[in-house]
Image (cartoon, rainbow, N blue to C red):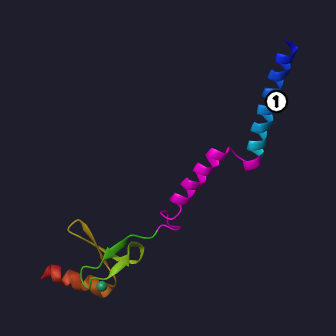
């Protein structure tokens, strides 16, 4: 009776220390940490450090301009993006003709 109880205690204690040693050894649960690292590594190359402005095409000269630097001209309910005032004027002239 007593021997069985002691053996049970020994097993529980051993299991507890093994669990604690594994936990401390890796910082976090080993399986979870490996999965997390893999997820982070997979996510990093796809996400750019900064949000790049959308590029708009100048319909006159064909140049691509970042939306926040373009000269915007609204015509017939649609927005047109130009690299310079020159292109904007040319576009308006062509439209008027
Ligand atoms: Zn242009």
Instruction: Give the quadrant of residue 37.
Output: bottom right
Q: Residues within 10 Å of mark 1 (few under 14, many from 20)?
A: few
86 left or right of 12 in image: left
Percent across and percent down for residue 15 are 76, 32
Residue drawn where x is 51% and y is 65% of the image = 45
Q: Quadrant of ligand 1?
A: bottom left
Q: Is residue 26 above or below residue 20?
A: below
Percent across and percent down for residue 95 are 16, 79
91 left or right of 19 in image: left
- Which quarter of the image is occupied by the C terminus? bottom left
Percent across and percent down for residue 54 are 38, 70
Residue drawn where x is 86% and y is 17% of the image = 3
For the residue labelled by badge 1, is the local secondary structure a helix, a strand or a loop?
Answer: helix
Q: How many marks?
A: 1
Percent across and percent down for residue 75 are 23, 71
Q: Nearer the viewer, residue 6 or 82?
A: 6
Q: Nearer the viewer, residue 38 or 48?
A: 38
Residue drawn where x is 21% and y is 81% of the image = 92
Most extreme residue toward the left is 97
Q: Nearer the viewer, residue 36 or 20?
A: 20
- Which quarter of the image is occupied by the N terminus? top right
Instruction: Give the quadrant of residue 81.
Output: bottom left
Is 9 included in the stretch rendered in magenta?
no
> Magenta region: which residues?
25-51
Label 1 sits on residue? 13
75 left or right of 7 in image: left
Is 47 included in the stretch rendered in magenta?
yes
Instruction: Give the quadrant of residue 9.
Output: top right
55 left or right of 18 in image: left
Residue drawn where x is 36% and y is 73% of the image = 55
Q: Is residue 64 above or below residue 32?
A: below
């Amino acid at each position: 009776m007593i021997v069985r109880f002691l053996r049970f205690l020994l097993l529980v204690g051993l299991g507890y220390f093994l669990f604690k040693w594994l936990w401390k050894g890796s910082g976090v649960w080993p399986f979870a940490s490996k999965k997390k690292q893999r997820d982070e590594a997979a996510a990093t190359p796809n996400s750019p450090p900064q949000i790049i402005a959308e590029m708009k095409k100048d319909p006159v000269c064909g140049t691509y301009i970042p939306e926040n630097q373009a000269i915007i001209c609204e015509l017939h309910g649609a927005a047109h993006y130009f690299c310079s005032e020159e292109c904007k004027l040319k576009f308006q002239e062509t439209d008027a003709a």
